[in-house]
Each structure stands twice: as C-alpha cells, then as structure tokens.
Amino acid sequence: MPNLENLRKQAKQYLRWHREHYHPVAAEIRAALPRFHGLDDHQILKANFQLADALELVARQSGFVGWEALKTGVSTMTDIPAPPLPEPFLSSAAAQLFVTDIKTSCDFFTTRLGFSIDFVYGNPPFYGQVSRDRALLALRLVCEPVYLGDVRQREHLLSAAITVDSAAEIKQLFLNFQATGVVFHQPLRKEPWGARTFIVLDPDGNLILFAGPAG
C-alpha cells in the first residue's frame, strides 16, 4: 500500500526541482496538470508552482484527480488496476557541444546563427541551452581539451546536425550566415546522396552541419 508520507515527500521533491529550474521536471508537470499543457519548459519553470500543485501532480500520476481524492482512496489503490501507461513520445533531442566559455558561445549562436538563449546555469555559468525553432543545442563548459589537435577538422567529426525542409531554406540559411561573418568548415554543396549541406565552425571548433533537400 502506498505511504502518504512518502508521496508527500515526492511532491516536495517536485517543488524543489521546479524552484531549482531543473528542466526534466517541466515535462512531468505539463503531462499531468492540465493548466500547464500549453506551456513550454521555460514557461513552466517560470510559472507559479506551489506545494498544492506538486501534491496534485503526485495524485494525478497515481490515477486520482487531486490530493484529497488520493488521501480518501489510498487504502484501495492496490485494488485498482493501474491505468495503462502512454507510449513514450520523444519530443526533442539536443546535441551537446563542449565549449570553453559559455558567454562567448551564447553570443556566437545568438548574433551569428539566430538562436535564442533558453537558459544559462551556474555562477559562473557552466551549462546552458540555445535554440532556434525546434533545433536545440546544449552547451557544456570544459576546461581541458576534449579532442587531440585538429582531429575534428581532419576527420570531419560533427558535433551536431540540423535540417531544414526545403532547398530554398538551406540556400537562404547559408547566405544569412555568410552575411554575419560565420566561418565555414564546408561551404554549401550538393552531396552525392541528393542533399545540400554546409558545415559551420563555432568558436570552439565544433562542426555543426546544416542540411536540406537539393531541390
């Protein structure tokens, strides 16, 4: 039989995660609480979220409409068939880039590539995320070399791959980046398999591929 005190502790943990802007908790809040359904992670973590909300979250995850209903029905929970679990849906993926300065990296992605800063964490910052449309890039501070010499450039080791839907978009994106002074590891070209691609070099030597249809 579930223990109410343990469930309350679980709710308090959710509350702490929300206050600490721990991003994975946003997805659980959005899935369980209807009033958060239309919000993205950033909006959820900035929203007012109290202990009562956390208790409701735990209750709904247990199959009840609220905390009071859970307290009333907890003694019979073991007799109630567990609700079917939804099939997991992978809503996004983020490549992780190793960088030597979070601020410099954020400046590059926002001013040169048109991304927005989702969040920066730490004082001084050691982690962050930038995004543009559905493309997400996590930035992780490293203080020692991760790769030997110029192996990434010699072996064309990509750190991230980002796609667009049309030939016109990939060409326009290349021209936009060219106008902002971006350094290219590889200019726009047509690949043997039918795509058009180019590769951007960020300040830390990360290779970021952009690809789209050849037209």
Image: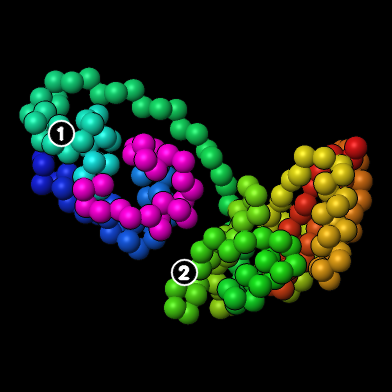
Identify the element where label 1 is drawn: helix
Range shown magenta = 31-53
Q: Vertical placement of 22 versus 180: above or below? A: above
Circle 2: residue type: Tyr
Q: Vertical placement of 9 versus 153: above or below? A: above
From the top left corner, tell me how far across and down residue 31 is, in percent. 39, 38
Question: Label 1, label 2: how many angstroms apart (C-alpha)?
Answer: 36 Å
Q: Is 43 one of the magenta-colored residues?
A: yes
From the top left corner, tell me how far across and down residue 199 is, in percent. 81, 58
Q: Vertical placement of 66 versus 142: above or below? A: above
**In this image, 35 relative to 128: left or right?**
left
Q: Quadrant of residue 91?
A: top right
Identify the element where label 2 is drawn: strand
Task: Please tell me which residue lies in front, 97 or 4.
Answer: 4
Task: Inspect this view and state whether residue 28 appears.
Answer: no
Task: Inspect this view and state whether residue 82 appears.
Answer: yes
Nearest to viewer (mark 1 / mark 2): 1
Q: Residue at x 50, y 34 (%)?
A: 89
Q: Residue at x 10, y 46 (%)?
A: 5
First of labels 1, 2 by sequence position: 1
Q: Quadrant of residue 213?
A: top right
**In this image, 63 relative to 91: left or right?**
left
Instruction: Tell me the number on the disc at residue 70.
Output: 1
**In this image, 162 relative to 18: left or right?**
right
The reply to whether the C-beta atoms of the residues labelled 1 and 2 are less than 8 Å apart is no
Instruction: Tell me the number on the disc at residue 121.
Output: 2
Q: Determine crowd level at label 2: few under 14, some 14-19, many 20+ residues with C-alpha closer than 10 A.
A: few
Instruction: Tell me the number on the disc at residue 173.
Output: none
**In this image, 97 relative to 68: left or right?**
right
Circle 1: residue type: Leu
